[in-house]
Image: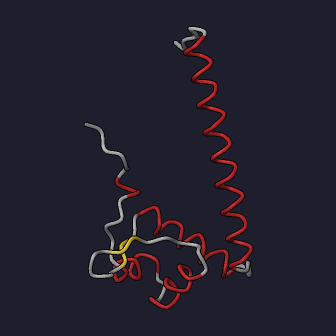
């Protein structure tokens, strides 16, 4: 059975490892979470768990901050990108339904 998430999306990395991978402090990582730029999962004990995709996102955020971009601007861009991705996925789904309905197959 195929897994629902790729390894990049599994939230298994501790904040300590994220610090080592990104060079960010725990405070910076938590700040980006407070600003709703990153969304770790919590274990039953309350520890944060991150994915490799989260680590990549944190590096991108840190680079933008270093370039002088404000967290608000980063968040707004993330919202716009999510909207574009959602619209593209919706369009692809509708196209697939039309193809199925009218028997269109790609070879």
Q: Residue 33 in the image: x percent, y percent?
A: 53, 79
Q: Residue 94 in the image: x percent, y percent?
A: 63, 28
Image quadrant occupied by the N terminus: top left
User: Would residue 76 appear left or right of 1 to someone viewing this image?
Assistant: right
Q: Residue at x 59, y 16 (%)?
A: 99
Q: Residue furthest top?
A: 103
User: Would residue 12 appear left or right of 36 to someone viewing this image?
Assistant: left
Q: Residue at x 69, y 48 (%)?
A: 84
> Please, is residue 19 above or below residue 61 in the view?
below
Comparing 103 with 63, the one in front is 103
Q: Residue at x 46, y 83 (%)?
A: 23
User: Would residue 85 appear left or right of 50 to someone viewing this image?
Assistant: right
Comparing 77 with 100, the one in front is 100
Name the image quarter holding residue 89.
Answer: top right
Name the image quarter holding residue 36.
Answer: bottom right
Colouring mode (rainbow / by chain / secondary structure / one colour): secondary structure
Q: Residue 35 in the image: x percent, y percent?
A: 61, 80
Q: Residue 60 in the image: x percent, y percent?
A: 59, 69
> Please, is residue 1 above or below residue 13 in the view?
above
> Please, is residue 4 above or below residue 23 in the view?
above
- Label count reads 0
Comparing 57 with 36, the one in front is 36
């Amino acid at each position: 059975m195929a897994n629902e998430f790729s390894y990049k999306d599994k939230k298994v990395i501790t904040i300590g490892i994220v610090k080592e991978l990104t060079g960010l402090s725990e405070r910076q990582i938590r700040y980006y979470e407070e600003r709703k730029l990153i969304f770790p999962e919590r274990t039953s004990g309350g520890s944060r768990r991150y994915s490799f995709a989260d680590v990549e996102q944190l590096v991108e955020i840190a680079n933008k901050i270093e370039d002088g971009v404000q967290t608000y601007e980063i968040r707004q861009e993330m919202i716009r990108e999510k909207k574009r991705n959602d619209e593209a996925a919706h369009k692809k789904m509708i196209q697939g339904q039309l193809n199925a309905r009218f028997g269109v197959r790609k070879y």
